[in-house]
Amino acid sequence: MAIHQSAEDYLESILVLQKRLGQVRSIDIVNELGYSKPSISIAMKKLRESGHVCMAEDGTLTLTDSGMAIASQVYQRHTAITRLFQLMGVSEETAAEDACKMEHSLSDETYRCILAFLEKAEDH
């Protein structure tokens, strides 16, 4: 399930946009991430070819099971790291930005420890 960080970001964006908008098109990803239309088109083609995304005739994008698994994992890491940073006093915006930088390279051990810490912190 190893894919590039940029692909993980695209898949996570599709997941977030699906939650927010219900359905996602490439232009939504352009608007969300601020990348050019050609860059998004190329990325979506690669994600379709790798079996992580499907595109309907109307241009609507959906995550396949493998795409959803990756997107969910990245999104869960993102939200956990964001919560940790906010507990430390970091502003919401900065916490989310920094979490995005870290979510891809965090070890499983560190992630498990973050989750355990958050669980203890939220119980108090």
Image (tube, rainbow, N blue to C red):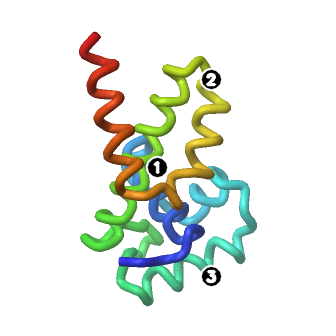
**Mark 1 sits on what residue?**
17
- Amino acid type for the residue under numbered disc 3: Ile
Q: What residue type is disc 2 on?
A: Val
In the current view of this chain or complex, which residue is farthest to the bottom?
A: 49
Q: Indicate left or right for 35 with 8 as reference.
A: right
Q: State the SS at label 2.
A: loop
Pointer 2: what residue?
90
- How crowded pointer 1 is (Cα within 10 Å; few <14, some 14-19, many 20+) is rated as some
Q: Which mark is residue 42?
A: 3
Question: Is label 1 or label 2 in front?
Answer: 2
* Front-most of residues 84 and 51: 84
How far apart are the two marked residues, 3 and 1, measured between alpha carbons?
A: 19 Å
Q: Is residue 54 above or below residue 5?
A: below
Instruction: Tell me the CA gap for discs 2 and 3.
Output: 35 Å
Residue 90: x and y, percent? 62, 23
Name the one closer to the observer, 38 or 94: 94
> What residue appears at the point 53 percent right and 60 percent down from the top-left corner?
105
Q: Say which residue appears at 34% left-offset and 19% top-offset.
A: 121
Q: Quadrant of residue 71?
A: bottom left
Residue 19 image point, x, y percent = 37, 44
- Residue 35 is labelled as none
On screen, 103 above or below 66? above
Q: Quadrant of the C terminus?
A: top left
Q: Residue at x 75, y 67 (%)?
A: 36
State the image coordinates of residue 106 (x, y, percent, origin top left): 48, 55
Mark 1: secondary structure = helix
